[in-house]
Image: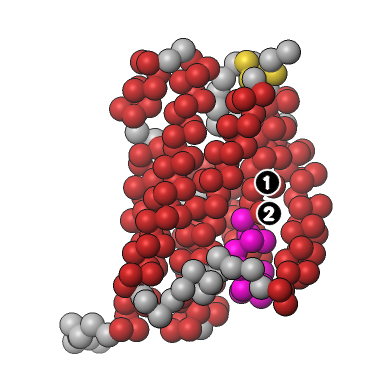
Amino acid sequence: MNHFTIDWTWKALDLKICLPILLTLVFFSIYWFTSKSEKIKRIFYNKYDFDQASLKHIFFTKYFGFFFMGIFPTIICLIFLPEITLADLGLTLIYETSLFSLFWIFVLSAIIVPLTYLSAQKPKNLVNYPQIRAKVWSKKMLFINALGWFLYLFGYEFLFRGVLLIPLIEPLGMWPAVAINIALYSATHIPKGLDETIGAIPLGFVLCLLTISSGTIWIAFIVHLVIAWTNTFTALKFHPDMQLQK
């Protein structure tokens, strides 16, 4: 049996590899356990009626996710990896790839929207969506729900397609960076069930390649947002216990 000598030397390259992975693990975990905290949930449900409590609690988890997945990991990454900029992390507009991005946003949305629309009607999907479990939805609720998903998914995609993916390509190579990204991305879907966990693998693979090709996070962010909005509003339409306020 072979054994290895532990090398305690810490190199700059080690930080560039380890920091994005650890930031993703730590800050996603903070978000996840906060969003699932029964103590935090009770604060809202003890203060408001059911519909308002559900709205405010879910929106809290969304903007909490925006800060703890999108803002704080990015700040730490920029501080400890000063050679990396926001543009390097994909938060930029690149004229040369703008048509490429628009094309793939349109193509993927055209494929995903009808598939999501059909799957969102299924009873097993209606158990979890829409996440806001209000019985009667006002126009204000619709707007807050859409805004919540916008904020949350911006933070989420910037963490996974920006912080976790792009800094790892140079030290590890493209395919190891993509493999690490898909593994963690798929793992975050485990609590949502087998279907979403498996579905996250090909989707994560495609979004990684498109992020690398475009140099920005916008394809991943917008396509993911289209999926979330389609799923949420379709589930709301077909949920037997929910209705729009007239």
Q: Position of residue 83 (x, y in %)?
A: 40, 80
Question: Looking at numbered disc 2 in the image, what kind of residue is underneath it?
Answer: Val
Q: Position of residue 165 (x, y in %)?
A: 50, 70
User: The residue tagged with tag 1: helix, strand or loop?
Assistant: helix
Left or right of 90 in this view: 64: left
Q: Quadrant of the C terminus?
A: top right
Do the numbered discs 2 and 1 sit on residues whose CB atoms are within 8 Å? yes
Residue 28 visible somewhere in the drawing: no
Q: Residue at x 34, y 33 (%)?
A: 37
Question: Circle 2 sits on which residue?
Answer: 223
User: The residue tagged with tag 2: helix, strand or loop?
Assistant: helix
Which mark identifies residue 227?
Answer: 1
Which of these two is toward me, 22 or 196?
A: 22
Q: Is residue 217 magenta?
A: yes
Q: Residue at x 37, y 68 (%)?
A: 77
Vertical arrangement, residue 228 with respect to residue 170, above or below: above
Q: Position of residue 196 (x, y in %)?
A: 59, 47
Q: Position of residue 58 (x, y in %)?
A: 48, 32
Q: Residue at x 35, y 39 (%)?
A: 34
Span highlighted in magenta in the image = 208-221
Q: Is residue 31 magenta?
A: no
Tell me if mark 2 has few (under 14), some (14-19) or many (20+) residues whose alpha carbon lies within 10 angstroms of its own.
many
Question: Looking at numbered disc 1 in the image, what kind of residue is underneath it?
Answer: Ile
Vertical arrangement, residue 4 with respect to residue 224, above or below: below
